[in-house]
Image (tube, helix red, strand yellow):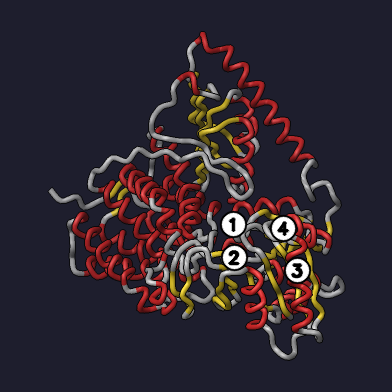
Amino acid sequence: MAVNTIDAKMLAKMFLAGAKNLESKKEWINELNVFPVPDGDTGTNMTLTIMSAAKDVAVMEANNDLDMQSLAKAISSGSLRGARGNSGVILSQLFRGFTKAIRESETIDIPLLAQACERAVETAYKAVMKPKEGTILTVAKGASLKARELADAGETDLEKYLSEIIDHADYVLSQTPEMLPVLKQAGVVDSGGQGLMQVLKGAYEAFLGKEVAFTVEDSRSAAGAPFSSIGTQPQAETDIKFGYCTEFIIMLNKTFNIKHEMDFKAYLESIGDSIVVVADDDVVKVHVHTNDPGLAIQKALKYGALSNMKIDNMRLEHHEKVIRMNQKASEEQAETSAQAASGDRSGTEAPRKETGFIAVSVGEGMNAILKDLGVDYIIEGGQTMNPSTEDVLNAIEKVNADTIYVLPNNKNIILAANQAKYMTEDKKIIVIPTKTVAQGITAVINFVPDLGAEENEAAMTEAIGAVKTGEVTYAVRDTVIDDYQIRQGDFMGIGDEGILAVGQAVESVTLNMIDRMMEEDLELISIYYGQDTKEEEAEALREKVESRYPSCDVELQYGGQPIYYYIVSVE
């Protein structure tokens, strides 16, 4: 008998299976990145994005607390907060659009599924300023068009329907090298599109009945926050850290927006684990394992009246000693969190000021340079780990200013920064689209306190347009790109638009890269050497650059960045 609808329970299983399948293939997807750099991270970014939602969905499934609206909220909110990199942000927007279409329905049939796919693609395309075909967007659009075609043709067998959509999306993915020459030259399909296919294929396997043991592995975000280790299997009693399973519903008496949700979850994380906070229009469903349910209840009462309260002791009487020990640890965590909230965090104790700066950076020297220029908060990350939307939101909260300029300093972080901008209500956020730390430094230098926010935004954006950046690293695999034959272990000089130099020695590659970057009217060459470059080697390079370009000022500074031996800017 043909299955023709999907309920919330089935959708949760499909989502978790899709997440697990993506997680298992993330390294393979990373290797599809066109540039063979050691920080190719599409698979990692997409995995961390979907896992941010999957951990909440897993708890909801384990507690049999599933309805379509709550599930849709958990998928959308979790992925938006956890979105990393362009591919992760686009994936989160696909989920956002999809869940908007299905959240008011108890089940999903083929016509609704076609509508949800269209809504997903529409939302994702709107999130990207200049959509590029041959990417994850193209694969998603191909799946959506097929979904609509089959629905309009009267298809009623959901198994056949899903199978044909996936087959067509796979075909569209196979054609991405024909749409983007850089993919064809490298001999790969689009990595983001492949990541999306793994989500779809995993979800389809769950629909067919394949059981997937889902567990979110212990992992850390760029900001160092651990993911909860949540699975569908019950914990052994000896492993239980927090003894009371606490559940209730908040009947809201005031607005409960995404920031309130994040603040409430952060508090619960300070007193427990296995946390789910799912907000509907006028109610919030809460689940937490804690050693002091009263703390969770008192906090929740600030938002409204409580109902459907349920508290279960997950341990037997003879484990009370363990409970007391863990309660002490929980109280210490809560005290630390309270101290942080009351002023032991950067920016919250200082008087409110007109303007603040947030920059993404990695490397002791780079961070010091930005701070010396007046940047209030550094988000650790960039090339080696793209911060999430939530990391940016947390930084925004810690900078006590009316207007905050955010410098992503990486083209793969701009979308996440913009997503954080739209999720912030009480501060004016201006994202300067800096693609490198060198551009970020230039942006801050060109800030003029006497100008208004819009004037500064225009001036800073114009200034970074005059900065060329090159970065020197090593290749992690053989490939062909920009007509360069690259072997594993080669050194590469990568410019704003592609490969500029390839060779066997760091210094010669760096010099060749700079030669390719130079133009007659350029006056300043800034060289930042990384943590794996010796100072004497950097000094020798500076002298050679000065001799080649005697009319330019050549500055050498310690950046301390990992993976990249040199970052060079010319302007």
Q: Nearer the viewer, residue 2 or 521?
A: 521
What is the three-letter code of the residue carrying label 2?
A: Thr
Going from the N terminus, do you reach mark 3 or mark 2 first?
3
Badge 3 or badge 4: first in the primary sequence? 3
Nearest the eye: 255 or 19: 19
As measured in the structure, the alpha-carbon distance from the residue carrying label 1 to the one carrying label 3 is 19 Å
The residue carrying pointer 3 sits among few (fewer than 14), some (14 to 19) or many (20 or more) residues within 10 Å by Cα, namely: many
Q: Quarter of the image containing the C terminus?
A: bottom right
Closer to the eye: label 1 or 3: 1
The answer to whether the residues at label 1 and label 3 have Cβ atoms under 8 Å apart is no
Image quadrant in which you'd find residue 152: bottom left
> Which kind of residue does numbered mark 1 sit on?
Thr
**Mark carried by residue 441:** 3
Whichever of callouts 2 and 1 sits on the residue coming sooner in the sequence is 1
What percent of the width, then of the height, locates residue 22? 39, 52
Q: Indicate the position of residue 224 as horizontal and vertical percent values.
A: 62, 44
Which label sits in the foreground, 1 or 4?
A: 4
What secondary structure is marked by label 2? strand
Q: Which residue is mark 4?
A: 560
Between discs 1 and 4, the one toward the N terminus:
1
Residue 96 can be seen in this image:
no
Q: Earlier in the sequence, mark 2 or mark 4?
A: 2
Pointer 2 local density, CA inside 10 Å: few below 14, some 14–19, many at least 20: many
- Residue holding disc 2: 473
1 or 3: tag closer to the N-terminus: 1
Kindly report the distance in space between the C-alpha atoms of the residues bearing marks 2 and 4. 14 Å
